[in-house]
Amino acid sequence: MTEEEQQELFGRLKASLRNSVEVTITVFGELGNRQVTGGVAGLDPKHRLVKVETSGDWELIEFENVLAVELSSVEY
C-alpha cells in the first residue's frame, strides 16, 4: 500500500471519529481477511492503533492491518 493510500484510509478513520459515523474496516488476517463494523472511538498515530466500538464491545486494530475503510451514512 502506498503512503497516499494509507493517508486516505487514515483520513476516513478520522472522519468517522470526528463525525460519529459508522465504518466498515477490512482487516488483514493470516487465515483470511475479516470485516469490523462500528464507530471509531480513538486513533493513536504514535502506536498506529485504531479503537473501534462495536455492538457493546470494542477492538484495537493495528493500522498496518487495515486494508479498506468504508464510511456509512449511519451515525453511532
Image (spheres, rainbow, N blue to C red):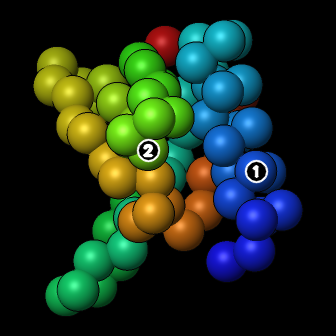
Which amino acid lies under the numbered mark 1 shown in the image of this protein?
Answer: Gln
Give the left or right position of residue 70, taking residue 23 as reference: right
Q: Residue at x 41, y 65 (%)?
A: 65
**On-image quarter of the N terminus:** bottom right
Q: Position of residue 4 (x, y in %)?
A: 83, 62
Give the left or right position of residue 4, taking residue 74 as reference: right
Name the residue furthest right: 4
Which is nearer the N-term, disc 1 or disc 2? 1
The label on residue 7 is: 1
Q: Residue at x 31, y 25 (%)?
A: 53
Which amino acid lies under the numbered mark 2 shown in the image of this protein?
Answer: Arg
Give the total number of marks visible in the rendering.
2
Q: Closest to the observer: 48 or 68?
A: 48
Name the residue furthest front: 46
Q: Residue at x 61, y 52 (%)?
A: 69
Q: Is residue 56 above or below residue 68?
A: above
Give the left or right position of residue 53, taking residue 19 as reference: left
Q: Position of residue 60 (x, y in %)?
A: 26, 39
Q: Position of residue 49 (x, y in %)?
A: 38, 40
Q: Closest to the observer: 28 or 22?
A: 28
Question: Can you identify the residue that label 2 sits on?
Answer: 48
The label on residue 35 is: none
Q: Is residue 72 above or below residue 74?
A: below
Q: Is residue 36 above or below residue 65?
A: above
